Structure formats: C-alpha cells, structure tokens
Amino acid sequence: MADGRDITLTIHGLVEFNDEVDGEVFAEKFSAFMRGLAASDIAANGERRHQFIIGDLRKNTATAQIVERKNKVAAITHSGASYFEQAIDEIRRDSQPARLLPLKVVESVVTLNRGVGRSFQFGEIKVEGDNVIRLDPYLAAQAEKVLADIKKLEGKPAYFAGMALGSFDGTLRAVDFQQAQKTGVVRLSAGDLPLTCDISRVPLEEIAAALEKRAVFYGTARYDGKSGLPRLLEVRRIEVVPKGEGLVRWQAAFEAPPGDDEDWEAQ
C-alpha cells in the first residue's frame, strides 16, 4: 500500500540531567503522540484509514520516527499526520478553528506539552517536508486554554436561535400600554417562568379578558439562542382557558389552532 507522510517526535532532556530523557516521560509523550495521530486520522477521514508504523527509534536522542501507511483502499485519503500538524498550529495561534478540533486531538496536545521545562526541556515534532513544531511552555499554555474552552462549550446546551410559530400556556400578570409597543408579562403554567410578550396586535378587549386568567398565547416566538425560552413572543391571539378543563386543555395548547393564514402572517 502507498505510504503517507513520515512524522518524528523528539524529546529533549533537562540540562541538569545531562540532556538525558526519563523513560517514563518519553513513554507518556510517545503514547500521547500516537493517540493524537489516531484521533487526527479519524477527524481527517471519518474513520481510521492509516496505520502509524514505527520506522525508527533512537535511544540516544529520544526520537521516534513514525511512518503513515494506508490500511484501506480509498479514492481519497487525507493524511492524519498533516491534520495533526495543522491542529497544533491552530492551537498555538489560539484561533477560533482550534475550538472546533476534536477533544481527543486537543487532549493529546495537552499531554504532549505537560511538564515541559520541569520533566523535560522541550520537544519537537516534524512532519516530512515541513517546519519543526516545538513543544514548549507557550504551546502548553495555549493547549490548556483551548481545551478549557472546548469543555466549557460542550457543557452548554445548544439552544435554538431564530423565529418560530408557537403557543404558550400561562397567565398574563402585567401589561404596559404607555409605549408604542404594548407589552405584557406572562407567567408560564410550567415552571412559573416569566415570558415577555408584544401584545400590540391583540384587541384591547381580548387583553382585558385574559388579564390574571389562565390562557393560551399564540404568536411568533423569537429565540436568541441563549435560553430554551423565547426572548419575546409576538402575540397574535389569546384564548382564555375555561375553568375545569385542566391538563387536557393545557396539552392542546401546544397545537396551532385552525384559522385564516393571515392570522399567522409573519412580520
């Protein structure tokens, strides 16, 4: 099978230890190096398409040369070694694309740089035909920062941003007619959460009939992507829930009622 690119890892020992590299340190870095290549191969191709074969191990310089070799016949195969190289460059530059890298790739870069200046002097990664990538305190700090940002983003739920027709069950607690845009606050039946509403297009008598009563509010919900609730509901219709209908009526509130298309005409 056709070979990919050669990639080499070199770890330099501390000056105070005569530049010798501790075996456990090299094993940790080599393991992270291989995990990074494997994760990069998957990221570049959607699956593993390369083997990373040990081409050479040099004890006197703590160097491992890896040969990238295709293990699947495919029309298009992207180099995992090149992806790893580019990923490290994005991390060093603290770029926005670095925040989109796979977690395992970034974690491998963090481990590769961990302890630099303390358990080893510095390291080098060289992809065949390209510049040397240096493992140093600066890259260590950048990798930790990018990893923290990715984990922070992973912990956040993905909320919808945009507009959608919807209906909400709640009680109109307050209204403000003093501004050009008439607004109200609905306390939702589920969770008693406040929802700001634009009620400018609702007839005054309909608003008065719904005040302090449980009702269903139909309209266009505007979501800003920061919460599961809309930032604003532009109300087109209010239907007061008759007493005694309870949960059955509440469930029906999430279905759009029949009506003329112009009742739902978007702004």
Image (cartoon, rainbow, N blue to C red):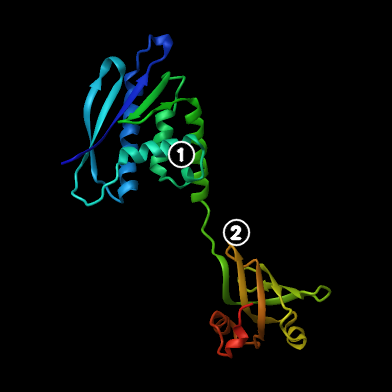
Q: On the rendered structure, is 99 left or right of 221?
A: left
Q: On the rendered structure, is 68 left or right of 163?
A: left
Which quadrant of the figure has residue 68?
A: top left
- Horizontal and vertical percent position of residue 54: 22, 30
Nearer-the-camera pick, 146 or 134 = 134
Residue lying farthest to the right in this orientation: 178
Nearer-the-camera pick, 153 or 215 = 153
Identify residue for label 2.
226
- Horizontal and vertical percent position of residue 163: 58, 71
Quadrant of the image containing the C terminus: bottom right
The dot on residue 61 is none
Mark 1: few/some/many CA within 10 Å (<14, 14-19, 20+): some
* Residue at the image point whose x is 21% and y is 28% from the top: 55
Q: On the rendered structure, is 151 left or right of 19?
A: right
Identify residue for label 1.
90
Placement of 19 over or under 5, stated as above or below: above
